[in-house]
Image (cartoon, rainbow, N blue to C red):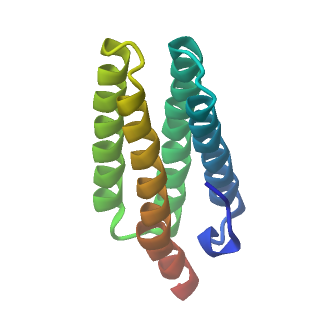
Amino acid sequence: MEWREKYSVGHSEMDDDHKQIFAMVDSFSASLLAGDGPDRLNTVFDELLNYMDVHFIHEVGHMKEIGYPDLFDHVTMHEKMVEKLRRLYDQHKLDDASSVVAEDMAEFLENWWYAHILTEDMSYKEFAESR
């Protein structure tokens, strides 16, 4: 995943978080492509999940601060995404780092983040700018 300015939500903390998440998804994909073993993949993914939790707390705080009216729906999307990732991750661990499941995880992460930032996160950016 490559960060581009079009992903900016106009808030430095959120943008920094998103840049870090992009880098972590890249790290996971690179580990997968390098054929790294399950221990490395699990470590990278654990770090990513933990950082996403922190980011979501930051993002919810920002949305509360600006009075974003679709906060509940946005949080629900985060929860569904994390739930799906945890299911894939549990399957990944159970399958002893199956490359197919790991590839599914990487693809899901990339697709979800691009779509989420360009649609949902841009909504709170537009709301903040309109105030």
Would you say 87 lies left or right of 8 here? Answer: left
Residue situated in front as seen by the camera: 105 or 120? 105
Above or below: residue 13 compared with residue 11? above
Quarter of the picture containing the N terminus is bottom right
Q: Position of residue 75 (x, y in %)?
A: 34, 52
Q: Position of residue 112 (x, y in %)?
A: 41, 55
Q: Position of residue 108 (x, y in %)?
A: 39, 47
Residue situated in front as seen by the camera: 100 or 114? 100
Q: Residue at x 60, y 21 (%)?
A: 36
Q: Residue at x 43, y 65 (%)?
A: 115
Above or below: residue 37 compared with residue 60? above
Q: Residue at x 58, y 24 (%)?
A: 35
Residue situated in front as seen by the camera: 101 or 3? 101
Where residue 103 sits, quadrant-wise, is top left
Would you say 8 lies left or right of 75 here? Answer: right
Q: Residue furthest bottom?
A: 130
Above or below: residue 33 compared with residue 60? above
Above or below: residue 106 compared with residue 131? above
* Number of marks: 0
Would you say 47 lies left or right of 72 here? Answer: right
Q: Position of residue 106 (x, y in %)?
A: 47, 41
Where residue 32 sits, quadrant-wise, is top right
Q: Residue at x 57, y 83 (%)?
A: 129
